Amino acid sequence: MAKLLPKRDAVIIGLGWTGSILAQQLTDAGLNVVALERGPWRDTATDFNIAYMQDELRYAIRKDLFLKPSVEAMTMRNAMDQTALPMRDYGSFLPGDGVGGAGVHWNGHTWRFWDSDFSIKSHLTQRYGAKKLQGLTLQDWGVTWNEIEKSFDKFEYLCGISGKAGNLGGQVQPGGNPFESARSREYPTPPMKMSYAPTLFAQTVAQQGFHPFPTPSANLSTSYVNPLGVRMGQCTYCGFCERFACGNYSKASAQTTILPVLMKKPNFELRTESEVLKINLHSDGKMAKSVTYIGDDGIEYEQPGDIVLVCAYGLMNVRMLLLSKIGQPYDPVSGKGTIGRNYCYQTSSAARMFFDGKHFNPFIGSGTLGQTMDDFNGDAFDHSALDFVGGAGINCVVTNGRPIGNRPTPPGTPRWGAKWKQATVDGYNSSMGFSSQGSSYPVRENYLDLDPTYTDRHGRPLLRVTFDFPENDLRMSHYLSDQMEKIAKPFGAKVTTVSRIKKGWDSVPYQSTHNTGGAVMGSDPTTSAVNKYLQSWDVPNVFVVGASAFAHNAGMNPTGTVGALAFWTADAITKQYIKSPGALVHT
Amino acid sequence: MSSSLISRSGSRLRSLMAFATVALLTASPAFAASNAGKYQAVLGDCEGCHGKNLAGGVALETPFGKLVTPNITPDRETGIGTYSLEDFRKAMTQGVGPGGKLLYPAMPYPYYARMRDGDIAVLWSYIRSVKPVKQAQNVNQLRFPFNIRFAMHGWNLLYFQPTALAPDSAKSAVWNRGRYLVEGAAHCGACHAPKNFLGADKPVLTGGLLQGWYAPDLTGNKVSGIGNWSGDDIVDYLKTGRNAHSIASGPMADVVENSTMNMAGGDLVAIATYLADLPPSGGPGGGVDRRDMQLQAGARVYRMNCAACHGLDGKGSAIFPPLAGNANVTQALADTAARMVVAGSKAVATPAAPTGPAMPSFAWKLDDAQVANVLTYIRNNWGNSAPAVEAAVVERVRAEK
């Protein structure tokens, strides 16, 4: 029997970005909150020590900060008629681990999804007709841009995001992204200072009539004091962001923006190395009463709470619902059920240009030191004559010049030996790249469920990912590869390579950690797991917060929208739910 | 479930209202006395040595061995529950416990001796009101002969002159209040005064070495002291733990958190007024020539390891403290600075400045000579001037940490 603990107003599963934001907002509203985090406590000076944080072997290659498959693995397959096998190591994507979650090791691209994303089905149907969306399970998110804009603003000001507004209250701003939806105010800090590669990129694509702008960055261009009074330092462009934690207090994370305030609150408690096994429901199945977890002492506890906030990594949120039997699991044959539905990923390709006599100095880098053009993203361009919907942001970002991982060589270079060595020396400093980060639109047959065979260390079924790139997205990505070839030509490089994505998603090489969907938000309980406030349709005292709620994935990094959804949910709980607990949306 | 949430919210509201009522009651004389006593405990930083619950057990490392602080809760067996007000007053002002037991001056009775009777009386009423904790402490773990309390007779004869502070009529009331606090309850000299060979504080605040930290010079010296701080800078530092010149960490972080952060604004101004008026000390003694090889080597270490946060110009940033003009790095002894590098240090976090940034340890990365070199560079750049640091100092600090 699990040891029963005193009840709390709210129990949070996972203390990453969303858990921290919700804990902060709910404790501000006076609730007594406990957070249960499976991984360890992590703090900047002790765990992200600047004296050794730049250890590429330890952090980037051996993946020191990431979730280990021995703790939780997943199985994968490309199609329903295959048998899924466990990933022996995380490769294609790298879930975070410990306090701060994936917000510790991200690159810091901080986007807002667009007005046309939140109402994607209505928008595309109106513009192109319903036939254009055939085969896709695209649906509106149930929340509108005007409702959620303030939440984006809150997240950006919490983080101190460095960028340039492109649309202030409907007025397009020079230097910003003309395709973004209207924002209520400028970014909190100015864009990062550009190094040579993004400067050249911006010049060259602007000459072609495109609209480059500084990629909005959570690696700050200047010191910043956020609305909680927490201070961040200026980014040093060291180029150790993705897969690393920031030792300089320069990259926005729960550690650098919220935890110094949250951890001191008397009505907040964090228990680390505490793994939640499931959410327990009252006997009528209508309300959650508690969660069962194994504490750092190995003892099983039952933690009751009036509200349960599922704030783990998106994929784990879905698994938690399935394991807890909350909501109806999605069935790809009938299309019925909601838990596991609309799983999406990211559809990307890359261009690399090798020059003679140019010096890009990629060691001056940052996860978000770069320029983006959104001329081919989302519905920024006319798809009438095209055989797909969706698009990609084209990013020229100098994330790093790290010595092990960053050794670009042109095609035809030997894989080892003196010629390879010479080519890596030449390619390191005289090549630059840009890439397309493409949307991923949902189809009936891409989904998440529990694996029938493989279990974790506690005997619970693993999550099974059934995914392949849909035809729509492949056509989109190939179109983007064509555009990138055209865009690259005027650069006059000696050699240019542009990759083209292929059918048959492979879970081994790293691609993107932007897994979305599976517990999507919406206004129809038959096609969404949670309502517009990320509240479970089935168990209204359970909120499921994170990229799991995305009804599709756009051609952008998800964290900005994840942060906005966390503030949006927190507002719904503090302003509506605690005054009148129960379903916030009635159908 | 839903009803329980509501009722709980309701009870929260009720407790908030109760709090408001209590706040109104502070006007009553009885409550005012107990509150005033609590404030005296803040001024004297009782929690700093006797712990949050005043039950003691905090180990103080002294050059004479270890002293563990006693339980001063009203528990009759293990605390001071059997004390009378007079017993308490004698302990506070004469260093003598009931039965003539002599206290060690780690208990800063030479400072508390200057407290007014009324302040001690309200402090006593507060101490009587805290929750008794049964927890015995093995207080005296000093080496021979210092473990013999009787020896303190001689010490007191030599170094202890319990005298009340006569107001200095040439100075303002604010200055006099500041002196009363600095030289009395707040006992700043317990750390910031140099010690003689038997551990007695000299009557100046020119800096002192204690428990492996060098508490910096608080006089008007512009290099090693706080001569470049405005009165507001001093108040900001004591209230928030940071100002444009420095950020509190190490033992001072605890002092800010337990004591100065909670002091009344007027008292902080008084302390600032008094400290700002202290005549400059002689400073740390000569600096190092810019051409010095140690300094040159240190500059390279600095560029690679320190500049990212503290800046090539040594000016720091909104989050990290400057090293230019930061008295912590220019003291006569470089123990604190060396400790920062080899052990790291976490700054205090206060409601006004909640970040509490920390300096990581470079013990793994820099050897003793590199640390000595970089400290020599920091101590002699951007207008700083202090003697060179020897690798042996770093070696000692590394062994202590």
Image (tube, coloured by chain):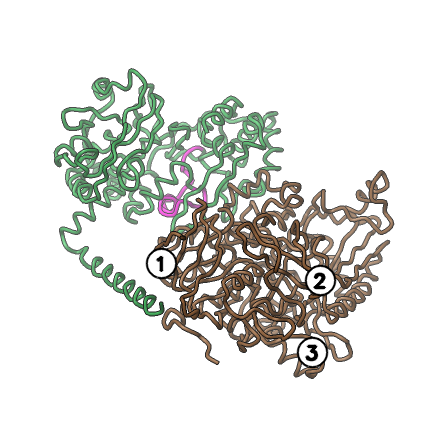
Q: According to the colouring, which chain is brown?
A: A
Earlier residue among tags 2 and 1: 1
**On the rendered structure, is B384 left or right of B100?**
right
Q: Colour of chain B?
A: green
- In the displayed structure, A277 sits above or below B253; it is below
Foreground mark, 1 or 3? Answer: 1
How dense is the environment of label 1, judged by Cα within 10 Å: few (below 14), some, or many (20 and up)?
some
The residue wearing badge 2 is: A82
Residue A258 in magenta stretch:
no
Q: Secondary structure at mark 1?
A: loop
In the rendered image, residue B354, in percent from the top left (x then y), is placed at 42, 50
- Mark positioned earlier in the residue sequence (1 or 3): 1
Instruction: Answer with left or right where residue A205 lies relative to residue A213.
Output: right
Residue beneath disc 1: A7
Under circle 2, the secondary element is loop
- Identify whether A121 is placed above or below B1: below
Pinpoint the chain carrying mark 1: A
**Mark with earlier residue (2, 3):** 2
User: Disc 3 designates what residue?
Assistant: A133
Tell me the crowding category of disc 2: few under 14, some 14 to 19, or many 20 or more residues within 10 angstroms, Cα based.
few
Q: Which residues are magenta?
A: B224-247
Image coordinates of residue B51 in percent, x first then y, are 30, 38
